[in-house]
C-alpha cells in the first residue's frame, strides 16, 4: 500500500499521476462508446474485420500509423523522440462463441458470439491509453509499443504475433497486460498486482484420443473388436500417471472432459474418442514432456492389449504465465502512485499460488520480463454476479478510464525509471 503523499507526488519533467487520471477521466464517454460498439459486434478468433477497422481508424485519427502484425494483430508505436527502452502494452480483442444472456441494452447483436471475457473492455482501455500517450508523447522517455491482439481464447494470437515480429523492431524490454475481472466480491476499479512474481497462471493444452476397433452387431461381440472397452480401460489406466508417476510437488493435472462412442444401444461402434486438457505450472516443460510420453505409451499399450489401435494428439498449447518479480514490484509502486488504495498486492489472496486459468500472453512472458495484472470490473455484491465466460457476465465500464490511465502510467513511469 502506498502512502498518501506518494499519490500526489510530482514526477520530474512529467505530468503527475493525478493529472493523468484526470485526462483519462475526460475520455470516459469515448471509452464507453468504443467498448459498447465492440460489445454489440463481437468477433471471434482471427476473424476480427470490424474490430480491427475500429481500432485502426481510432489510432489513425489520434495521429498513429498502425501496422498489421500476423494474421489479425495491430501494432502502434508511441514516443521514440527521447532515447530509452521499449515497453509493450497488450490488449486482446477477440470474443467467445457463446450466446449472450447478460440482458444489458448494448448486448451482442451477433447470434452465438459474445464478449464474455471482457476483451472489448481491454481494447477500449488500450485505445484510451493510446490517446493519453499521444497527448503526452513528448514526455515518453523511450518507446511504447501498443499491441492489439487477436485469438487469445484459442491461444494462437500471441504466438502468431511473436512469430511475425511483435518483440522486434524496436526490441521489447518489458511487457505489460491487464485483464478485467468480473463477479468477484471486490469493489470495481481495483488493480491487483502479483507482486510475488513467479508462475501466476497454469499452462494449458488440449488432447484428443481416438481408439479404433471393429464395429458390428451387438449380439456378436466375438466378431467385433470393441473400442468402448479399450477406451474405458485407457481412461482408468491414465489415472495412474496422476496418482503414481508425478512428483507430489509438481503441479500437473489432466482431465478427460468428453468421452464419446457409438450411436445405438445394439451396435458396437468402429471407434471411441476422448478429449481433455492438461494443465501444469512447470516453466521448464518437464512435466508436460513426461505427460506426453506416458500418456502416449499408455494409450497405445492399453489399446494393443485389447486388440485395438489408438492415437493421441496434443494441440493448442499455452505455457504457464511467468511474472517478473522486479517488474511486478515496479507495477505495484506505480499503481499505488496512480490509484492509492485502489492498487493491491494480490499475493495475500492467492498465497503466491498460480490461478487455474490460462492466458496466451504467457508466450511473451517466456521471452521478455512480463507482468500480468487484473482490474476488477464488477462487484458480485452489486449485481455483477457472474464470472468470465458465463453467458450472463457483465462488466462495469465505469472502470475503463482507470484501465487506460493504468496502462499509460505504467509505461511512462517504467520508461522514466529504466533508461
Ligand atoms: Zn477468456
Ligand atoms: Zn480473457
Image (tube, helix red, strand yellow):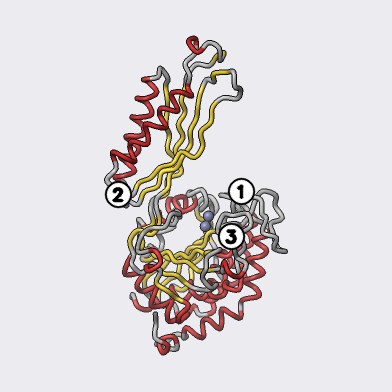
Residue 399 seen by the camera:
yes
- Identify the residue at image location x=31%, y=70%: 326
According to the picture, the residue beneath numbered tag 3 turns out to be 386
Q: Is residue 403 left or right of residue 284?
A: right
Q: Nearer the viewer, residue 289 or 182?
A: 182
Q: Secondary structure at mark 1?
A: loop
Residue 328: x and y in percent read 36, 69
Please identify, in this view, whether the residue under mark 3 or under mark 1 is nearer the observer.
Answer: 3
According to the picture, the residue beneath numbered tag 2 turns out to be 250
Q: Quadrant of residue 167?
A: bottom left
According to the picture, the residue beneath numbered tag 1 turns out to be 97
Quadrant, the N terminus: bottom left
Q: Residues within 10 Å of mark 2 (few under 14, many from 20)?
A: few
Residue 198: x and y in percent read 33, 61
The residue carrying mark 1 has its beta carbon less than 8 Å from ligand 1? no
Q: Secondary structure at mark 2?
A: loop
Q: Earlier in the sequence, mark 2 or mark 3?
A: 2
Amino acid at each position: 500500500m502506498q502512502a498518501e503523499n506518494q499519490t500526489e507526488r510530482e514526477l520530474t519533467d512529467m505530468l503527475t499521476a493525478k493529472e493523468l487520471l484526470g485526462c483519462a477521466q475526460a475520455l470516459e464517454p469515448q471509452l464507453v462508446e468504443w467498448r459498447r460498439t465492440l460489445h454489440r459486434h463481437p468477433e471471434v478468433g482471427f476473424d476480427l474485420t470490424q474490430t480491427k477497422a475500429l481500432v485502426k481508424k481510432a489510432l489513425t485519427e489520434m495521429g498513429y500509423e498502425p501496422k498489421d502484425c500476423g494474421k489479425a494483430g495491430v501494432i502502434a508505436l508511441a514516443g521514440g523522440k527521447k532515447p530509452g527502452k521499449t515497453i509493450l502494452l497488450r490488449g486482446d480483442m477477440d470474443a467467445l462463441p457463446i450466446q449472450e444472456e447478460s440482458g444489458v441494452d448494448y448486448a451482442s447483436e451477433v447470434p452465438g458470439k459474445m464478449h464474455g471475457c471482457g476483451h472489448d473492455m481491454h481494447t477500449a482501455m488500450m485505445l484510451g491509453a493510446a490517446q493519453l500517450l499521444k497527448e503526452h508523447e513528448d514526455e515518453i522517455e523511450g518507446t511504447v509499443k501498443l499491441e492489439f491482439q487477436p485469438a487469445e481464447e484459442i491461444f494462437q494470437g500471441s504466438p502468431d504475433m511473436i512469430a511475425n515480429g511483435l518483440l522486434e523492431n524496436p526490441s521489447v524490454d518489458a511487457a505489460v497486460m491487464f485483464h478485467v475481472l468480473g463477479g468477484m466480491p471486490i469493489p470495481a476499479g481495483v488493480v491487483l498486482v502479483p507482486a510475488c512474481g513467479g508462475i501466476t497462471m497454469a499452462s494449458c493444452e488440449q488432447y484428443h484420443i481416438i481408439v479404433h476397433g471393429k464395429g458390428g452387431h451387438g449380439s456378436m461381440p466375438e466378431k467385433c473388436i470393441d473400442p468402448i472397452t479399450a477406451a474405458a480401460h485407457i481412461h482408468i489406466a491414465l489415472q495412474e500417471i496422476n496418482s503414481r508417476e508425478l512428483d507430489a510437488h509438481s503441479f500437473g493435472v489432466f482431465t478427460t472432459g468428453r468421452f464419446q462412442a457409438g450411436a445405438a444401444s445394439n451396435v458396437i461402434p468402429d471407434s471411441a474418442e476422448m478429449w481433455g486438457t492438461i494443465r501444469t505450472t512447470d516453466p521448464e516443460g518437464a512435466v508436460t514432456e513426461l505427460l506426453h510420453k506416458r500418456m502416449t505409451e499408455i494409450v497405445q499399450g492399453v489399446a494393443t492389449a485389447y486388440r485395438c489401435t489408438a492415437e493421441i494428439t496434443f494441440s493448442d498449447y499455452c505455457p504457464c504465465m511467468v511474472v517478473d518479480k522486479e517488474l511486478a514490484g515496479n507495477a505495484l509502486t506505480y499503481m499505488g502512485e496512480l490509484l492509492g488504495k485502489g492498487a493491491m498486492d494480490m499475493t495475500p489472496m492467492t498465497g503466491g499460488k498460480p490461478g487455474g486459468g490460462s492466458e496466451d500472453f504467457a508466450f511473451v512472458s517466456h521471452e521478455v520480463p512480463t507482468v500480468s495484472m487484473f482490474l476488477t470490473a464488477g462487484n458480485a455484491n452489486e449485481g455483477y454476479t457472474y464470472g468470465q465466460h458465463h453467458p450472463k457476465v457483465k462488466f462495469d465500464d465505469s472502470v475503463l478510464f482507470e484501465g487506460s490511465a493504468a496502462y499509460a502510467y505504467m509505461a511512462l513511469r517504467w520508461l522514466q525509471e529504466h533508461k
